[in-house]
Image (tube, helix red, strand yellow):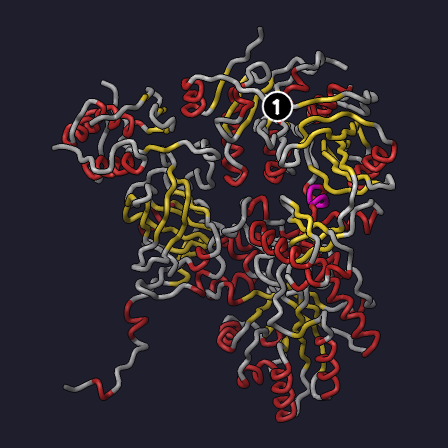
Amino acid sequence: MSEKPRYERPSLQRHRSGAMNKMGSFPGLRSKGQIDGVAVGELVERYGSPVFVFSQRTLEDRIRTLRDAMRLRWPRVQLAWSYKTNYLDAICQIHHREGSWAEVVSGMEYERAMRNGVPTSQIVFNGPYKDDASLERALVGQSMVNLDHYDELAAAERIAERLGLRPKVGIRLNMSAGSTPRWSRFGFNLDSGQAWDAVRRLLGGGKLDLAGIHCHLGTFVLDLDAYREAAGKLAAFANRLRDELGVKLDWLDVGGGFASQSRLKSQYLPGEQATPPLSRYAEAVADGLRGLNTPPSEMPLLILETGRALVDDAGTLITTVVANKRLPDGRRAVVVDAGVNTLFTSFWYQHQIHPAVPLHGTPEPTVIYGPLCMNIDVVADSLLFPPVEVGTHLLVGPVGAYNIPQSMQFIFLRPPAVLISPRGEHGLIRRAEVLEDLVSLDRVPDWLRGE
Amino acid sequence: MELDLAISPSGFVFDPRTGATFSANPAARLLLEGMQEGEGLAALVARLQAHFEVGEADDLERDVLEFLRVLQDETLVPAERELEG
Amino acid sequence: MARFTETVLVTGLNATDNPGPGVAVAQSLRDDPDFGGRIIGLAYDMLDPGHFLPDLFDASYLIPYPSGGREALFDRLAYIQEREHAGVLLPNLDSELPALMGQEAALGALGLRTFLPSRAQFDQRNKDRLGELRDKFGIPVPRSVNLVEVEGVYALHKLFPFPMVIKSPFYGATIVHNTDEAVHAFWSAAAQWGYPVIAQAYVEGEEVNVTALGDGRGGMVGAVAMKKMLLTDKGKGWAGVTIRDRGLLSLSEELLRVLSWRGPCEIEVRRDRQGAFHLLEINPRMPAWVDLCFGAGQNIPLATARLAAGEAVTSLPDYRVGAAFVRVSTNTLLTIEELETLSSAGERHGRRTS
């Protein structure tokens, strides 16, 4: 007697123009049963679901690739790990072991960098709000403070005067470059002459030394010309500082913004085809800096604050199917145990979703919902996905950037994070939250106690 | 139930009334054939059980009822139609 | 040259009113007595007309859309190669190239070879970067500016006079006559295609097109110039005739030289009233009228296939001026079973060789 075929739920797909093609017209058709050689089942059994899984090997590869590509083209290069992208201690420490400094944007992040053993002189301090205490600590600690606005400049001068210091500072510049929308809210505008005014004001004050210039173009910038142009403008500005004001810079900071392999919602081609490799970003920056007119002995340190492009591709979230539904419009809906509370980036990116086991059956238009009792909790809309059973694990990626720091304890607690070493060992780098972690912060005032 | 459809063994479905064409997977093809023969809910479930290896988690009754909604959405059967038994 | 007997995979079977070039490519191969291979069509839609031309194609397969990613595409190519053992892949749509450029090793593992530009060459011809060709190499490109904010639109009149062209790097172009129209066109281009939006000086004149084949080392293997005689409402050529203009061909040669272009391309040029040429676009592939090149004496599809296969093709013979084409739109009758085959199996086999 022949075996009966395994049952798959009935599916009827209308043929539509432009969609008469069932030949795997979606990414993630392939199953992925393991991450860096560790079985998905083993990870879930040990750590539960959902769980973030980071690949140390991928992270190290990305760091080394960028560092080497930039050093090939520029004599003095320093990566500064963008803490806000992912500030799990283990992730930060991998960066620091690879020689990266820290780039922070608040006092809290500054303290995180210090407790990871980063010397204060190797911390780049950016951001539009640096409270007085944090600013003072950074100036005393000889960190690379990039000033964002005139009020901050004045605050730095007050601190310097009070403490009898003459700190070196940088200023942040914004500008139009390439075809990336202009981020004009941070720093001083270069194109309008505001930046030049700020420099004259800074030097005129006589309390601070200008040692660096910084710019950060935006986020997920796919346009290499934007970096070429921005680096060119920085170089021209540095030349002018030198020629007209005799300022010799210690550092030139081109910020971050390089894209990962992820895919914006508006993007047609997947990241593998749309995102330039790190070497081409490095090439664009070096091209732009070519006009820098500085003797070799006085070459400023080139700082890169790359965040997303280094860590995003190293992170995967394992989530589990908890329910199947049919929506009134005919689409299939799948509910999984991690939603936008955990995957904040699903608002802007089309993540790849791979099943941990091969799925058979006809792909159908499917919505993947998270577990929140909120209409906005959509992990993936209009995905072509084969039928999937409750209990199936799905791998969502790349999610290594921003999801850990931006996830929240809304309705559910935050999941654990696991690191896999290049040798295949794995262990927690953040344990799962428990209720006590949250309620220990709560206080009930006296007048609500008693009867 | 009246279901005037041309259904091929490969799962290609043609609606001669509207000209629409569809792809049906094996379970859907089986259900369409059963409906053409006028089978009710219980018979359709039995038909699936006879042809497939069904797991414990599968809820055939729910799947058949959902499938009927799909057919109604596609206007292959009238919206008010219910399965018997 | 020896007869070419490799099996060739050809994409772009959408010979509709906005035609993909695949059918014209297949026609050029099939009609050349020097071609003795098989032709396999690769298509995205089961109703792409190329599926239903069994005189041209030995078989055709559905393949995943470019948005589906490289993995899905290579899985499908592996499946097809197990059955067809083709030696050459001729991709004919712009959107297919990012998945294939620089993938010689992965394609080679499937037994496939291509003759494509590098990613850098491909990017250099993006519409928002054509201006660099003017600035760096003196190629005559109408003046243009890339805009990422609407403020820039209000200053356009200082750069060049109205009318001007507002377009996206991807598709479509609008001629605008004043700032109001330009603002409107800016927002609609940005909404549909994102940034940048390109504003370009309008050049009045006649459009002429060249299909050219670059050897990747700066040389031009062949080139045929054509004037469209009749346009569809989408601006696509419905009829055309080969022409010869020394200036046009030397512009093409110069372009291929400065780009070191590897592979075929279509160069769109406008000739102004003074007879000067202005480069509008470079499409990184053969056009849907490429069979006219064959008809005029230069089989650019076959030459591309030969170069992909590693044969030396240095230069094609001169072409005949006055060769013309008209696109004939006819209906092909099918049975529902023929649709069923493609829908269910995703492939169709069998060539008609009567």
- Quadrant location of the N terminus of chain A? top left
Q: Is residue B12 above or below residue A148?
A: above
Tell which subunit mark 1 falls on: C
Residue at coordinates 53% horizontally, 82% vertically from top-left? A131
Q: Which residues are magenta?
A: C122-126
- Quadrant location of the C terminus of chain A? bottom left
Is residue C260 among the parts visible in the rendering?
no
Secondary structure of residue under mark 1: helix
The residue indicated by pointer 1 is: C23
Q: Amino acid at mark 1?
A: Val
Residue A82 x/y as whole percent: 55, 66
Foreground: C36 or A287? C36
Q: Is residue A397 left or right of residue C274?
A: left
Residue A442 x/y as whole percent: 30, 78
Residue A219 x/y as whole percent: 57, 60
Foreground: A432 or A84? A84
Specify the quadrant of the image occupied by residue A48.
bottom left
Which residue is outermost to the top?
C354
Q: Report if residue A375 lies within the magenta region.
A: no
Residue C261 x/y as whole percent: 76, 37
Residue at coordinates 59% horizontally, 56% vertically from top-left? C187
Residue at coordinates 43% horizontally, 23% vertically from top-left? C345
